[in-house]
Image: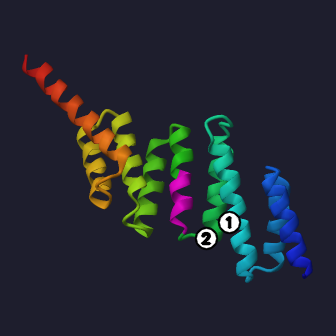
Amino acid sequence: MGENDISIEKANELKNQEKFEESLKILEELYKNFPNSEKIKKELIVTLFSYGGYLNDEYILEYEKAKNIFKKTIEIDPNNYRAHYNLGIAYFNLGEMKKAKNAYKMAIKIKPDYKHCHYNIGLIYETMGDFKHALNQYEKALKIDPNFTYALHARNQIRKLIDELKNTSEN
């Protein structure tokens, strides 16, 4: 087992103990010294994702930090659609809807069949009161996966709301 493997193992132990910053310090140093190592790059991205997810959690509420972690992930791996998606979640949680939508659209550009992005864009439109565009996004998610429970529920709620608004305006 080489010195890098021992360092990666130590970083993984720290990650598993939720000592993410200590783990990242080790991995970022390794990546700086060995930028062509796919193994180190992969470990760094996995740890960044773990930390970003931890920060984005509804109990931790460290959305600004999460945003920076996912931006760092994108710097390392620009075509990582999941990093763009998670960046969108961080922006959404920070109330930065335009940036969230752009992050989701970037993820869709990389992976056009990423149903969760269409669903989340629908949530943005719904939050803004733009039910027509929200419905359109939920429909796009359902074209990708007709059994996508969240999109099915959201679509049905929006249809019901649109009908209620129509009935109210007619009366």
Q: Is there CB contact under 8 Å for labels 1 and 2?
A: yes
Q: Is 134 displayed left or right of 45 in the figure?
A: left
Question: Which residue appears at 34% of the width and 37% of the height?
Answer: 126
Q: Is 88 displayed left or right of 45 in the figure?
A: left
Crowd rating for badge 1 (residues with CA inside 10 Å; few <14, some 14–19, many 20+): many
Q: Can you give x and y, in whole percent of width and height, for residue 87 in the image?
A: 56, 53
Q: Disc 2 marks which residue? A: 77
Q: Can you give x and y, in whole percent of width and height, for residue 73 in the image?
A: 64, 63
Q: In which quarter of the image is the C terminus?
A: top left
Q: Nearer the viewer, residue 104 or 23?
A: 23
Residue 39 sits in quarter:
bottom right
> Up-down: is 20 above or below 64?
below
Residue type indicated by callout 2: Asp
> How many numbered circles are shown?
2
Q: Is 170 displayed left or right of 38 in the figure?
A: left
Residue type indicated by callout 1: Ile
Q: Disc 1 marks which residue? A: 45
Q: Is 114 displayed left or right of 44 in the figure?
A: left
Question: Which residue appears at 83% of the width and 70% of the height?
Answer: 8
Q: What stretch is highlighted in magenta?
A: 80-87
Mark 2 element type: loop
Going from N to C along the chain, the mark reached first, 1 or 2, is 1
